[in-house]
Amino acid sequence: MIRDAHSRAGLGAAIALFLGTSSHAAEAPHEWSYTGASGPEQWGYLDEAYATCHNGSMQSPIELADANAVGDLDFSVDYAPAPLVLSNNGKTVQAKLPPGSYMTSGGKVFALLQVHFHTPSEHTLDGKAYPMVAHFVHATENGQLGVLGIMFEEGEANGELPKIIDAAGTAGPSPREFPGVSFDPRRLLPEKLEIWRYMGSLTTPPCTEGVNWHIARSTVTASPSQLQAMTNPMGMNARPLQPRHNRLLVEPD
């Protein structure tokens, strides 16, 4: 739960970052990356706004094995197709969604803001990272963030990914609409949505905490060529695992 004004301000900045409207990265003295001197181990020291990346106690991603609770959550999604609006900032490929798609979790309604990708996955299960994960990022009316993670395995081609792949080649850091192309987030979901859930953080600076994480147990597939085509514009963009500390991790029943 986010209670204080400073944390709420951080969430506001995080939502702006997710929507591609934040100017903080341009103002920061050092840009962050996934490797080298500006890589994950240094994020918390690059800028005071990123301090939580270093000193936070509820950071993400985590290993999903050894959950300390089992249970079913009142959880559902209601997504709708929308015109494809895509950005490619060199760190991730991101589809921005208009109002009209929602996730309901534990009685809270979260509006879908965007879907972005990591290669490989950030969360792991029994030490296994998947070739790719899609993060569906949502927010409630009062600014609480909720993320749904869908893991991709190598297998049959995914019917929706070609739209993302084709657009990523010409997309830039600012969201761009691709006329005549409709993106349907439902086609990136598995048939069953049984989920792990826990409280964590953003997995990129500013690493804001208080994020409601949901990771689907069932995976979806993409062909080897699709996975490679998604990796090409992003490279390795997965934050290393973070300590779980004493957090509650609930696995699906």
Image (tube, helix red, strand yellow):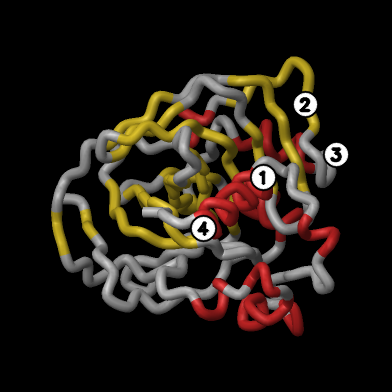
Instruction: Name the outermost residue toward the top.
Output: 180
Q: CA distance from mark 1 to mark 2?
A: 18 Å
- Amino acid on which the number 2 mark rests in the picture: Glu
Disc sitting over residue 7 in the figure: 4
| N-term mark: 3 or 2 | 3
Location of residue 26 (image quadrant) = bottom right
| N-term mark: 3 or 4 | 4
Residue at point 51%, 58% (across, down): 7
- Amino acid on which the number 4 mark rests in the picture: Ser
Could you tell me which quadrant the N terminus lies in? Answer: bottom left
Disc sitting over residue 177 in the figure: 2
Q: CA distance from mark 3 to mark 4?
A: 36 Å
Residue at point 74%, 43% (across, down): 21
Task: Judge the density around disc 3: few (<14), some (14-19), many (≥20) Cα neighbours within 10 Å.
Answer: few
Residue matched to label 1: 16
Between circles 1 and 2, the one closer to the viewer is 1
Residue matched to label 3: 170
Location of residue 146 (image quadrant) = top left
Between circles 1 and 3, the one closer to the viewer is 1
Identify the secondary structure beneath mark 2: strand
Identify the secondary structure beneath mark 1: helix
